[in-house]
Image: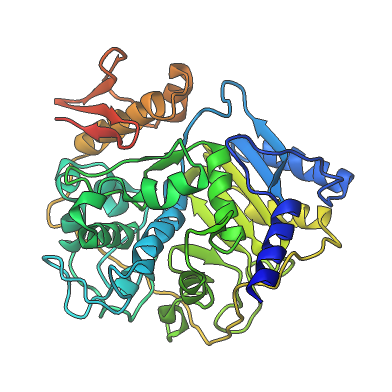
Amino acid sequence: MKILASFFLLALTACHPFPEDAWETTTPKKAGFDEAAFANYLTFMKDPGNGSETHALVVVKDGKIVTEWYAKDIDPAHRHTLWSASKSVSHAIVGAAWDVGHFKLTDAVTLPGAPPGLTVSDLLQMSSGIFWREDYVDPMKSTIIPMLYTRASHADLSSWVLSMGQEYTPGEFFRYSSGDTNVLMKWVRDQLPAAERDDFPWKKVFEPIGIRSATFEADAQGNWLGSSYLYMTPRDFARFGLLYARGGRWKNQQILSRDWLKTTLRDLAPSLKRKGAEKRSYANQWHLNLPYADGSGRPYNDWPEDTILAFGHRGQYLLVVPSLDLVVARVGADRSYFDDEKGLALLSQSLKGAKTVHPPLIATSVYASRAARMPTGTGLTTAPTMEELLSYFYAKELCSCLFVEEMPEAMCLRIQSQPWPASQVDVRHASREVAVSVGPLTLTSTWVSDHLGCSQTQ
């Protein structure tokens, strides 16, 4: 039986290779796409309109690049911020630690300020009950913006999140929360042997699958900002997706156990099944395509149930369909909503009749749900000033754009432009730092290393 299984694995790998440093390429026709329909899909993805701005697109089928496209002034070597798609990579890092027994999902989270009864699973499922408002529109009514762009939060990000206070009992209520992800990453890092902590994501996830470009920014304590600040090239983003398309396996090594993937991606978050929960197909830092809890269909009915997606602010996007051995990575700088549903519909049309590679990994679940509740306050005991938010925002984002993503300065200034212009921006290329003044306040962000990117220095 073992010999037969090994033979099957070798045969599958021959037909569906894993990329080395360089990727094999193929044509849409050879990959099973309808050429005319696929061309329509590419036209839309390159220029979705409505304020969307695609920077790069990589489509991978059966382990080979079908198409790869880059906007002007961007090339395959440029890293790109993943924003909230970083959460799905955090799922892999947590899984790698879980696989070797560093913790159980039912373990209590014992960080100072953590509410009684809070478990690892509650954080992973965005059900901590910690007060949170994931609002990018009004910075004075948001918790995500001051979490990312204030001196107090940068000093110790997880403690800052826990200081927001408790609104619900842990495990009771789902709310999409970057705060939960960052508390989770702090707690998981604390469970690792001290000698492994700094390099764990690289040694256990990135390097074994050939990701060489990953930069993971951290707070002043060295805790990764798993909610938002992971950077990598579009090809490496697609490489990460292929790890999930192949059931956590890379060549002859199981990077993430199938137990981890089945435990965390086969069902909706339990809090989404409760009365009052929002209508969402989500679990453990991934967007799913499982049936909604009320049985009213799936987010993408034309796609297999094992489809999983990672979404990030400003149009970062990763589509993974294990049963089709398909991965799509898209990065951008959108000013408005990216119509992923239209993109998926066009891609689906080009794949009509495509054969599945293996049975779906994820099982079906159907439950009952109700309308969502939202918080009404801010949770902040001391609100940051607009000067601090803007100074930190400009300094941090320009530093990362220039020295992590290595984009042209003109593009960085255009992408990061906001309705409230900074009074002064001082880009210091020799020392790789950016100082920004808004009113009387000046903040500086400095490039630290390839692994850690940029960090506030004053």
Q: Residue at x 29, y 20 (%)?
A: 432
In the rendered view of the protein, which quadrant contains the C terminus? Answer: top left
Q: Residue furthest top?
A: 430
**Closer to us: 315 or 407:** 407
Q: How is the image coloured?
A: rainbow
**Closer to us: 182 or 325:** 325
Q: Is residue 111 left or right of residue 89?
A: left
In percent of width and height, residue 221 lies at 17, 46
In the rendered view, would you say 448 is above or below 295? above
In percent of width and height, residue 368 lies at 53, 87
Q: Residue at x 67, y 62 (%)?
A: 9
**Closer to us: 232 or 211:** 211
Q: Residue at x 57, y 57 (%)?
A: 252
Can you tell which quarter of the image residue 276 is in? Answer: bottom left
Instruction: Decide if residue 320 is in sight here.
Output: yes
In the rendered view, would you say 436 is above or below 180? above
In percent of width and height, residue 313 lies at 46, 47
Q: Residue at x 30, y 47 (%)?
A: 145
Q: Is residue 303 left or right of residue 110?
A: right
In the rendered view of the protein, which quadrant contains the N terminus? Answer: bottom right
**Closer to us: 455 or 251:** 251
In percent of width and height, residue 55 lies at 58, 33
In the rendered view, would you say 30 is above or below 368? above
Q: Is residue 49 left or right of residue 91?
A: right
